Image (cartoon, rainbow, N blue to C red):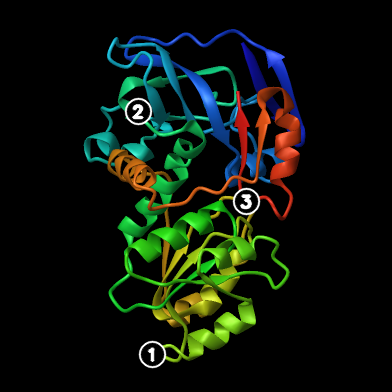
Amino acid sequence: MKAALLKGPYKVNVVDVNDPSPPKGWALVRSKAVGICGTDKAFYRGTYPLFKEPLIPGHEVSGEVVEGPDDLVGRRVVSEINFSCGVCALCRSGLYTHCPYKKTLGIDFDGGMAEYFIAPVQALHVHELSHDVAFAAEPLAAVLNALNLSPPRPGWSVAVVGTGFIALLAAQVLRLKGFEPVVVARSDSPKAGIFESMGFEVLAFEEALERGRRSWSGLGFDMVFEATGSNEGVSAAVALARPRGVVHLKSTPGGEARLPQTIAVVKELKLVGSRCGTFREFAEALRLLKDGLVKVVVSERYPLERAAEAFEASLRRDAIKVVVEP
């Protein structure tokens, strides 16, 4: 089969590799749409070292089952990305996404940016959506997981920092939950217009600071959802949060952030890191997408043969989501 191999910083080649062979209890899936996410871009830039080299990237993936249980063959599916052991203490406690023995699709286990990929049957979610919408179930489930870990309280003021795909999903989910988040963007952000077209108020950082001063506390936002995709976003989020506020950290750019630790300590902030969605959140994500309650915005689509171009395109400031279609 054809597959995109990531061999190091800025090194993506489409080559012929052996078709993956699913072991018992797994399925072979034909990839149809694969989103390039912030972690993929960090691998591509080299700011996040590869766990497997070479790697077939891609964990935001929708496809069709071609080999597996009879009731799944021919069905459209999205895959959870954590393939856990199921028997360790964390798995038995329900924290299977943190299994120390897990394999993670597109991270340390070959992903969906190929003609086929394999996944355990229990990780697959059947859907009837178009593939260029369904791929978004994985990042949307991650947003839902974050807000389930530490949800906003009624009446809270909320800010979303960033204008990427995760920020767009987070803003929409927060609105569905009854909040009207302020989106914090660079003054020259080429993606701000997407948020404005959906009715979100977009403010530059200094404007957002002033808005926070006009909140009930006069000292910042109750909750700040950081989704800049950079190491600098943490500082902005901490500055915008009120004392004893909540800061969600969602970026995975690799490298190290410069956390204004003293300010975070003095403010007594709750910093919440979060990773992937679980079975429950995947099901909820697919429902929201099916009902049209969350809009998916794709900047560009590329065939698998042009995967290297797709990665380059994903680095442009105006790209909110680039999709590869094997």
Pointer 3: what residue?
320
In the rendered image, the vertical position of residue 77 relative to residue 201, given as above or below: above
Q: Earlier in the sequence, mark 1 or mark 3?
A: 1
Quick check: can you spot residue 205? yes
Closer to the observer: label 3 or label 2?
Answer: 3
The tag on residue 323 is: none
Quadrant housing the C terminus:
top right
Looking at numbered disc 1 in the image, what kind of residue is underneath it?
Trp
Pointer 2: what residue?
123
Quarter where residue 58 is shown? top right
Q: Position of residue 34 (x, y in %)?
A: 56, 32
Quick check: can you spot residue 262? no
Q: Is residue 214 left or right of residue 208?
A: left
Q: Nearer the viewer, residue 25 or 189?
A: 189
Residue farthest toward the left in the current orientation of the protein: 92
Pointer 1: what residue?
216
Quadrant housing the N terminus:
top right
In the rendered image, the vertical position of residue 300 relative to residue 25, given as above or below: below
Q: Earlier in the sequence, mark 1 or mark 2?
A: 2
Q: Position of residue 290 (x, y in %)?
A: 36, 42
Closer to the observer: label 1 or label 3?
Answer: 3
Q: Nearer the viewer, residue 274 or 85?
A: 274
Name which residue lies at 57% across and 68% down. 196
Looking at numbered disc 3 in the image, what kind of residue is underneath it?
Ile
Q: Nearer the viewer, residue 261 or 59?
A: 59
Of helix, strand and loop, which one carries label 2?
helix
Label 1 close to label 2 by CB (< 8 Å): no
Q: CA distance from mark 1 to mark 2?
A: 44 Å
Looking at numbered disc 2 in the image, what kind of residue is underneath it?
Ala
Q: CA distance from mark 3 to mark 2?
A: 27 Å
